Image (cartoon, helix red, strand yellow):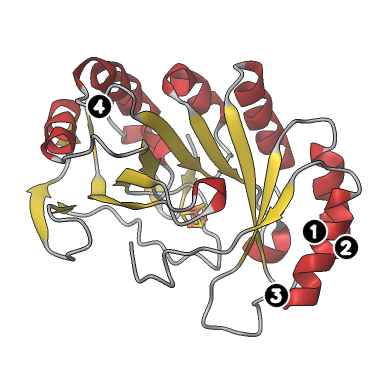
């Protein structure tokens, strides 16, 4: 495990996890926009993207929104065990939900916990058709291998330097995608695009993905700093360049921010 963001990830337990919040809402990004999901947001991340607006510091209490969209939360002390998480999830009425979204932070930091939790949840979940949807930064391929058998849909990021101000982890991204595709998992790659994206980066993305069956979602950054938000011409030209080598490249902004949802 990495030691980044002043956190030592080596002491994460297999039997409990620091969970920031549990709530029911719609997916606000990518091809599953609008689908109803239950979200479990894990604390901690192994990256430190400069545009990140997610609070992933470990919390003393996990917040649970009992009535969806109400903004009213009850609290449960962290860390949360697998049995407690299953109990809390099963208190939601989620028969009409599409999937359980494991999000963060970076949920794969809890792969040992997830291995146990997901095997138990398969047996105990009330909605047997509920899919498991992982939202990840796509940099932890070994951790992915541990839980991939439980996953239905994987939303991964491609972390380009103009957005993250760090070199793109192509090797980790490549191993991650190969693991998912070798297991025949549905996977799409999200690229957060700022006005600073370069033509070299666009070429690198195309080259990286050209022989891989992966849909690409170009997600314009959501930021109050209008200087970094890409304009229409930048977005469309980025898409056009990628479509010369890739089959499926879509521009999809975040919608939950417009709706003031979580
Ligand atoms: S990977 Fe996601 S959660 Fe982690 S720092 Fe980057 S944007 Fe934030």
Give the residue at mark 4: 127
Q: Position of residue 66 (x, y in %)?
A: 12, 52
Image-quadrant location for residue 258:
bottom left
Say which residue label 3 marks: 230
Q: Earlier in the sequence, mark 3 or mark 4?
A: 4
In what element is the residue under mark 2? helix
Up/down of 6 relative to 102, above or below: below
Could you tell whether 222 is left or right of 238 in the image?
left
Q: Are marks 3 and 4 in contact (CB under 8 Å)?
A: no
Mark 3 surroundings within 10 Å by alpha-carbon count, few (fewer than 14), some (14 through 19), many (20 or more):
some
Question: Between disc 1 and disc 2, whose residue precedes?
Answer: 2
From the image, tell me which residue sits under label 2: 199
Report the mark closest to the observer, 3 or 2: 3
Residue 11: quadrant of the picture: top left
Mark 4 CB in 8 Å range of ligand 1? no
For mark 1, what is the residue? 239
């Amino acid at each position: 495990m990495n030691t980044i963001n002043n956190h030592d990830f080596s002491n994460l337990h297999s039997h409990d996890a620091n969970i920031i919040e549990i709530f029911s809402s719609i997916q606000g990004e990518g091809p599953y926009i609008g689908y109803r999901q239950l979200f479990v947001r894990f604390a901690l991340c192994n990256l430190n993207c400069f545009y990140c607006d997610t609070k992933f510091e470990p919390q003393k209490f996990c917040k649970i929104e009992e009535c969806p969209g109400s903004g009213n939360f009850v609290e449960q002390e962290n860390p949360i065990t697998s049995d407690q998480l299953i109990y809390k999830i099963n208190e939601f009425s989620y028969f009409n939900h599409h999937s359980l979204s494991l999000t963060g932070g970076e949920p794969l930091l809890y792969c040992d916990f997830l291995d146990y939790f997901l095997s138990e949840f398969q047996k105990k979940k009330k909605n047997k058709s509920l899919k498991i949807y992982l939202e990840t930064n796509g940099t932890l391929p070994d951790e992915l291998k541990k839980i991939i058998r439980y996953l239905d849909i994987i939303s991964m990021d491609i972390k380009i330097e103009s957005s993250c101000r760090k070199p793109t982890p192509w090797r980790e991204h490549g191993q991650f995608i190969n693991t998912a595709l070798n297991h025949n998992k549905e996977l799409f790659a999200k690229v957060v695009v700022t006005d600073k994206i370069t033509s070299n980066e666009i070429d690198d993305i195309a080259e990286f993905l050209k022989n891989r069956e992966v849909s690409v979602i170009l997600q314009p950054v959501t930021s109050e700093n209008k200087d970094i938000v890409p304009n229409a011409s930048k977005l469309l030209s980025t898409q056009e360049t990628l479509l010369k080598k890739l089959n499926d490249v879509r521009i999809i902004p975040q919608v939950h921010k417009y709706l003031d949802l979580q």
